[in-house]
């Protein structure tokens, strides 16, 4: 297994609207997607394109959202996870299991519509790490 490109950095925020304003008005980002709900993941998501990577803004959706605790500790929001692409998600899962890295839950469909899973930050140097299968279309 070989790690692929950094696809996005997940940034938790209490307000996608406020964060979008910061990326647009302060950082000068011009390619900002439309926010959308992912009820099965408990988050609302909005992608901001930088030239080499995306920022994935994630806002809690519902009281039992998985990022509620993160925002309780980081009320302004903050860096939540990094996401690397792999060619084959099943091969990657087997690889990480073989390395003893804990995988958080099942492989599921992520915000890009491709399969993803998360690796426990305690096995990844303190960084919550998302692994996603590379979208079939080129970027
Ligand atoms: Co992500």
Image (tube, rainbow, N blue to C red):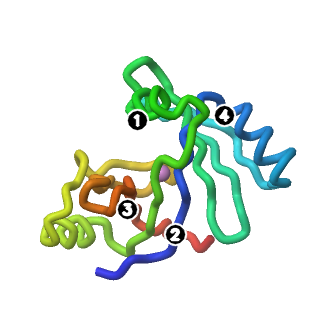
Give residue 131's mark.
3
Crowding at label 1, few (<14), some or many (≥20) Cα neighbours within 10 Å?
some
SS assignment at label 4 = helix
SS assignment at label 1 = loop
Q: How many marks?
A: 4
Estimate the x, y position of residue 77 in percent, counting from the top left: 57, 37
Residue at 63% of width from left, 59% of height from top?
54
The residue that label 2 is drawn on is: 6
- Alpha carbon separation for disc pair 1 and 2: 21 Å
Relative side of 42 to 13, left or right: left
SS assignment at label 2 = strand
Residue at 59% of width from left, 29% of height from top?
14
- Upstream in sequence: badge 4 or badge 2: 2
- Upstream in sequence: badge 3 or badge 1: 1
SS assignment at label 3 = strand
Estimate the x, y position of residue 61 in percent, counting from the top left: 49, 25
- Alpha carbon separation for disc pair 3 and 2: 10 Å
- Alpha carbon separation for disc pair 3 and 1: 16 Å
Residue sitting at the far front: 73
Residue at 78% of width from left, 42% of height from top?
22
The residue that label 1 is drawn on is: 41
Q: Determine whether label 3 and label 4 are within 8 Å by CB.
A: no
- Closer to us: mark 1 or mark 2? 2
Name which quarter of the figure residue 122 lies in. bottom left
Relative side of 121 to 95, left or right: right
């Amino acid at each position: 297994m070989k790690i692929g490109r950094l696809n996005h950095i997940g940034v938790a925020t209490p307000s996608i609207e406020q964060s979008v304003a910061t990326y647009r008005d302060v950082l000068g980002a011009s390619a900002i997607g439309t926010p959308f709900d992912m009820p099965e993941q408990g988050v609302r998501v909005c992608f901001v394109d930088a030239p080499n990577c995306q920022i994935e803004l994630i806002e809690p959706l519902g009281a039992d959202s998985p990022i509620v605790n993160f925002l309780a500790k980081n009320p302004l929001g903050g860096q939540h996870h990094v996401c690397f692409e792999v060619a084959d998600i099943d091969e990657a899962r087997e690889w990480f299991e073989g390395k003893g890295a804990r995988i958080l839950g099942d492989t599921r469909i992520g915000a890009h519509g491709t399969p993803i899973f998360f690796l426990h930050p305690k096995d990844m140097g303190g960084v919550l790490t998302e692994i996603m299968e590379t979208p079939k279309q080129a970027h």
